[in-house]
Amino acid sequence: MRAVPFDLRVPLSTGEVAVSTVRADSIEAVTTVDVTEPLARELAVGTSYSSLSQDVRAECTAVRQHVDSLADTVLSVLKYGLQQAHLDADFGPSHVEWRSPPDQTWRMLPYGTTTVLIDAEFPMDGDFDAAGVAQQLLDTGFQPFEALHHLHRARRDRDARAKWIDATIAAELAIKEFLVRRSPDLAALLLEVPSPPLHKLYGSILEHYAGQRSPRLRELQKGAEVRNKLLHRPGHEAPDLEQAARYVQDVQVAVLHLVSLLDPNDDVAEYFYRGALAKATRE
């Protein structure tokens, strides 16, 4: 289903709130920025970027980066919070516009660029409220697992070998991120010394710290063995694309299970975990 336009409020470190409008093909971020008098003067007369002083150019770049960061924050919530694996930003034809009191006329920022172009489809089945969930994630300071980057890349990749390797990297990162978030004292042990095998991490170790084992324990063990052969045995035949896709599904179930365990009251994480589990079980 195509995305229905909706507005999101993005909390800022200053205590203020920016507004981002999400459409099916773009994210438009709007915020208030204090600028120096030299930049204000150059903006008022419409000076080209090439004619700006070095200091004013640097300020323009800083303004752009600020607006870019707002769009990136929203994009992260949509991509990783709403599990939109295909979602990527294209900053090429994007732009930044400005306006100031009293005329309120929008003008192009020199060297401007940040409406982010996207291709979005959000889950709208049943009572699921994509806009409400995205806002909830923004308000609570959503921080996705870094593992999701590898998992989403594995989901998109059309090369079976690359899919398998990226999915296994996602599984390895996810369990470490989960354990460190759950018990920060484990960070040095997990990050500084060789890790136990995946089936141990997702089995007895996860059970010790979270009370349950992964629902995809055997699949992860086999997947790690296949990945090791792909990396360390030249010429080892890769699984076919269908097998790799199924393995990626199993890893997604395992990773989203971890996310759901972080907070038993997180209905959003539970929703996506249950959805992934049901899809993997059907297929």
Image: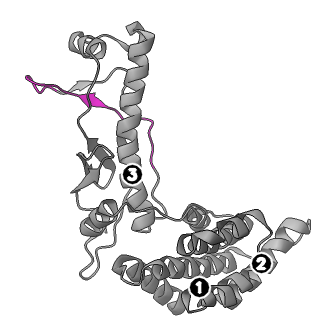
Q: Is residue 193 visible?
A: yes
Name the element at disc 2.
loop
Q: Nearer the viewer, mark 3 or mark 2?
A: 2
Q: CA distance from mark 3 to mark 2?
A: 34 Å
Task: Check the image and report above or below for 35 versus 150.
Answer: above
Q: CA distance from mark 2 to mark 1?
A: 15 Å
Instruction: From the viewer's perspective, tell me whether residue 141 is left or right of residue 6.
Output: right
Task: For label 2, count other residues whose C-alpha is less than 10 Å away and answer few (under 14), some (14-19) or many (20+).
Answer: few
Q: Amino acid at mark 2?
A: Pro
Instruction: From the viewer's perspective, tell me whether residue 83 is left or right of residue 70.
Output: right
* 257 falls in the magenta region: no
Tell me which segment is drawn in magenta: 89-105
Which badge, 2 or 1, comes first in the chain's sequence? 2
Task: For label 1, count other residues whose C-alpha is less than 10 Å away and answer few (under 14), some (14-19) or many (20+).
Answer: few
Provide residue 180's location: percent of width, then percent of height. 59, 70
> In the displayed image of the protein, which residue is found farthest to the left?
102
Residue topped by disc 3: 73
Instruction: From the viewer's perspective, tell me whether residue 129 is left or right of residue 215.
Output: left
